[in-house]
């Protein structure tokens, strides 16, 4: 089954403790992206990647890191989480064709205390 | 940077009625897409309309696009309780970046 898999689904952590949210897709998509979703703000893009070893900042990259060493994986790293990073996070992927839809993972709800 | 603005923010209707949601955007686009999100879950792609198209259908969904007014509408006919969800428009422009609006929360009462 074609899918984007994120883990974990829920994560509660403390300020400053490094964490990684994993994302994997099995559709051989070139493009992958991370979003955060907050009430009243919609989805905001954190980072995206057009292909292996190619990453770029989105609209809200501060406090986040990503890597794209393999085509299928695109982990999101929070080196020193802070409470304002409490949010619902989504990974998404697509082919790079202009009319390709995004395929989303089921989300990771992160709480930083 | 928000491109799409959905209207209304929330909509409550009875099962069997039609639901109409609107999306306005600011800059020229290559295509406009609609997504559905069930509570707390990932977004699911519903339909895409290209900038040179005016109307598109998919099952009970009908999407229109008016590029002169920079607006789109999503019509769900004969709504069901299972249609209860948030609906987002997303626009893709010259940069190929997909920008999402803030969504319309639709509640269909059985």
Image (spheres, coloured by chain):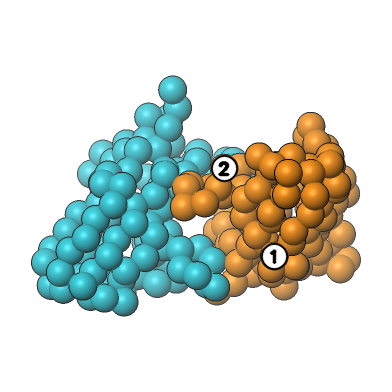
Q: Which chain is orange?
A: B
* Quarter occupied by residue B29: bottom right
Q: Can you identify the residue that label 2 sits on? A: B44
**At numbered mark 2, what does the secondary structure look like: helix, strand or loop?**
strand
Residue at the image point whose x is 45% and y is 63% from the top: A37
Q: Are marks 1 and 2 in contact (CB under 8 Å)?
A: no
Locate residue A49, reporting x and y percent: 38, 52
In the rendering, at what x and y percent does residue B35 appear? 62, 48
Instruction: Give the side of residue B61 with respect to residue A90, left or right.
Output: right
Mark 1 surroundings: few (<14), some (14-19) or many (≥20) residues within 10 A:
some
Q: Is residue A73 or residue A22 the one in the foreground?
A: A22
Instruction: Tell me the chain of label 2.
Output: B
The mark that comes first in sequence, 1 or 2, is 1
Can residue B2 be seen in this snapshot? yes
Q: Is residue A40 above or below residue B56?
A: below
User: Which chain: cyan?
Assistant: A
Q: Nearer the viewer, residue B25 or B96?
A: B25
Residue B36 lies, in percent from the top left, at 61, 48
Image quadrant where residue B98 sits: bottom right
Can residue B75 be seen here? The reply is no
**In terms of secondary structure, where does tag 1 sit?**
strand
């Amino acid at each position: 089954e074609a899918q984007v898999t994120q883990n974990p689904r829920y994560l509660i952590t403390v300020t400053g403790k490094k964490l990684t949210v994993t994302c994997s897709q099995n559709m051989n998509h070139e493009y992958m992206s991370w979003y955060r979703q907050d009430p009243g703000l919609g989805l905001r893009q954190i980072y995206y990647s057009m292909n292996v070893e190619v990453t770029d900042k989105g609209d809200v990259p501060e406090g986040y890191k990503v890597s794209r060493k393999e085509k299928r994986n695109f982990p999101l790293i929070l080196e020193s989480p802070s409470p304002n990073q409490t949010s619902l996070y989504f990974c998404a992927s697509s082919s790079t064709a202009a009319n390709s839809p995004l395929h989303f993972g089921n989300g990771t709800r992160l709480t930083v205390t | 940077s928000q491109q799409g603005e959905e209207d209304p923010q929330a909509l409550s209707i009875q099962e069997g009625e039609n639901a109409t949601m609107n999306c306005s955007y600011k800059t020229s686009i290559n295509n406009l897409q609609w997504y559905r999100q069930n509570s707390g879950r990932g977004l699911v792609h519903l339909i895409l309309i290209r900038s040179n198209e005016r109307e598109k259908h998919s099952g009970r969904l009908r999407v229109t696009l008016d590029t002169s007014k920079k607006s789109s509408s999503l019509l769900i006919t004969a709504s069901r309780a299972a249609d209860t969800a948030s609906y987002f428009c997303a626009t893709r422009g010259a940069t190929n970046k997909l920008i999402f609006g803030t969504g319309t929360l639709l509640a269909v009462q059985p």
